[in-house]
Amino acid sequence: MHTGESYHRFMLASRRARNVRRRFQNMALDLLPAGAAVLDFGAGTGIDARAYAARGHPTLVYEPSQPMRECLARHCREEIARKAIVPVGLPLTRKVQAVTANFAVLNHFAEHASLFETLARVVDRGGFVLASMLSPYYLGDARHEWWRANVMNLVRDGHYPSPGESGIHRFAPRVVVQAAAPHFRLERLVPRGPGLAFRLYMFVLLRRT
């Protein structure tokens, strides 16, 4: 499992990761009003945060992993020095227009209701949460025994843990939407329908009500 500098190098070197990140950043930036503040939740080494800050968005970063935070501090030192990027801890208190959570951050939670209650306190009404999450339907994982063993759990419950992946859980979109209500409503899911079987990541856009 990559962390810190090794994660940073891996994510910059991986073509698939770069493509996913580009699509995610473009979607977030298209949605953000000019100058709107954003919280990068599970910011990793700050790759997304730098992109938001470069477009004039005051960017808060929350990252629980110390190796990731240390790498972020090095990678984003100039932006942090001029307060274009501001590291924050728990509890989250500063109001923002949007929260972004890229590369399966929300898959590290076993349930999301309490998380969305927290995010509802910091996201302005009309703002949004944009998360990239692992698709539980992705056929590329069908070669794994854990995927085949959990098909019925997915059909019955809409979620399942992924054995061998530390702290990772897979969720059907409907489960995330149910957990987010009544604070957020689903505005967009990319891809939809059969497309979820062919992409590892799904983008879930939830609008603050």
Image (cartoon, rainbow, N blue to C red):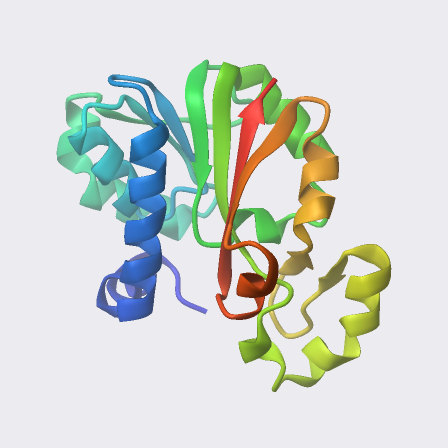
Residue at screen point 20% across, 45% down: 75
Q: How many marks?
A: 0
Rendered view: 121 above or below 144:
above
Q: Which residue in the rendered view is the most extreme toward the right? A: 156
Q: Nearer the viewer, residue 110 or 34?
A: 34
**Which quadrant holds residue 29?**
top left
Q: Is residue 162 left or right of residue 81?
A: right
Residue 27 seen in the current view = yes
Image quarter of the C terminus: top right
In the displayed structure, does residue 96 sit left or right of residue 133? left
Question: In this rendering, is residue 93 above or below 198?
Answer: above
- In the image, 138 versus 166, the foreground residue is 138
Residue at image point 28% right, 51% down:
22
Question: Image point 36% across, 36% down: which residue?
Answer: 28
Asked which quadrant contains residue 167, the reply is bottom right
Compared to 7, does 33 lie above or below? above
Residue 92 location (% of width, % of height): 52, 22
Residue 3 percent coordinates (x, y): 39, 60
Residue at the image position 55 percent from the left and 26 percent from the top: 207
Q: Is residue 46 shown to the viewer in this render?
A: no
**Quarter holding residue 134:** bottom right
In the image, residue 20 lies at what x, y percent? 35, 57
The answer to whether residue 66 is left or right of residue 110 is left
